[in-house]
Image (spheres, rainbow, N blue to C red):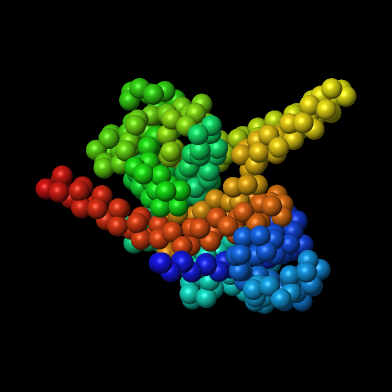
Amino acid sequence: MPEAAPVTRVAVDAMGGDHGPAVVVEGAVIACRELGLPSILVGPQGTVRAELRRTGGEGLPIEVVDAPYVVGMGEKVNRTTLKRRSSIQVAVELVRDGEAGAFFSAGNTAACWTIAKLALGTIAEVDRPALAAVVPHVHGRTVLLDVGANAACKARHLLEFAVMGNAYTRDVFHTPNPRVGLMSMGEEETKGNELTKEVHEALKGSSLNFIGNVEGHDLFSGRVDVIVMDGFTGNVALKASETLAESLLQLLREELQRTPWTRLGALLSGPAFRALKRRIDPAEYGGAPLLGLKGCCVIGHGRSNTRAIKHGIRVAAEFGRSGVNESIGAELRALGARKQEAGA
């Protein structure tokens, strides 16, 4: 029998998120117990160890690494931030030095993005790393990128995003020949702004399985596996999607409690409702991988609860053992070679 792939150890920013170390450490303990995922918790040692004792995590394969400083959720990233031995900085350096296979944080997104890019560097062929998020549809999932790392983009950046999203979807979700779409305001090639028109032409000439422009309703239609857009558009789309899912769950709970008959129906239909929640709850998707770096980084939502932390660590571990970074580099090199041949 072939040997099982080694388990990826994830360096976790224990201080990240709106709820602080209490939620992050508990989520890491749950990930270790339920999913068998070891981690390295990074933060002020006394604080982190106290939470580890409180959650009963002592004795599990969870290491604690001291980092005296914390980057606040609303803190502006500057030179002072980058010079501190913060929990984000130390955790990312563990990945850089090979002591961890991936990094996860629900902390300050700008700090995570900046520190990861500086400490790890980008894949040689990548100009702009991109955040990729996952949204569910009836038959599976769709990967969206960029969802917030790059508000303003050029055509070359969106082309890179398409290649990175294709590789991630294929290597992590095992989707053969992913269908790639470009977000626009109409399916016709003539629709959209000058940027989308230029990117459309470039994607048509690529080796990707490009099916053309898509619109907002295709986020959940299952028509494509990857949707490419600039980070401003992607961030708005992602946050609207997350809020819609949360609102639908809340409305459903209220309606099911309205009368004795609906409460009885809810009781009988409990397994189906729980399955529905798992499919649309943003916490089940954990976080957004930052693609294009020489290392595996996943950034979770600041409001992450313990379940979201658990799944964020899971996503980071899956990313770490996927080999997707090597695929991204190889495919972008091949794209560059085809461009040179076409130019010649």
Q: Could you tell me residue 155's position as x and y percent?
A: 35, 41
Horizontal side of residue 44 vs 134, given as left or right: right
Nearer the observer, 181 or 261 = 261
Nearer the observer, 282 or 274 = 274
Horizontal side of residue 312 vs 99, given as left or right: right
Q: Is residue 181 visible?
A: yes
Nearer the observer, 248 or 291 = 248
Q: Is residue 242 visible?
A: no
Q: Residue at x 65, y 47 (%)?
A: 283
Q: Could you tell me residue 71's position as x and y percent?
A: 66, 63
Horizontal side of residue 203 vs 267, given as left or right: left
Residue 124 falls in image quadrant: bottom left
Residue 208 falls in image quadrant: top left
* Identity of the residue furthest to the right in this view: 260
Q: Is residue 314 above or below residue 137?
A: below
Q: Residue at x 46, y 66 (%)?
A: 5
Q: Could you tell me residue 77's position as x and y percent?
A: 60, 60
Q: Residue at x 15, y 46 (%)?
A: 343
**Number of numbered discs present?**
0
Q: Is residue 46 above or below residue 31?
A: below
* Identity of the residue furthest to the front in this view: 1
Q: Could you tell me residue 20's position as x and y percent?
A: 74, 60
Q: Residue at x 60, y 55 (%)?
A: 312
Nearer the observer, 300 or 140 = 140
Classify the position of the N terminus by image quarter. Answer: bottom left
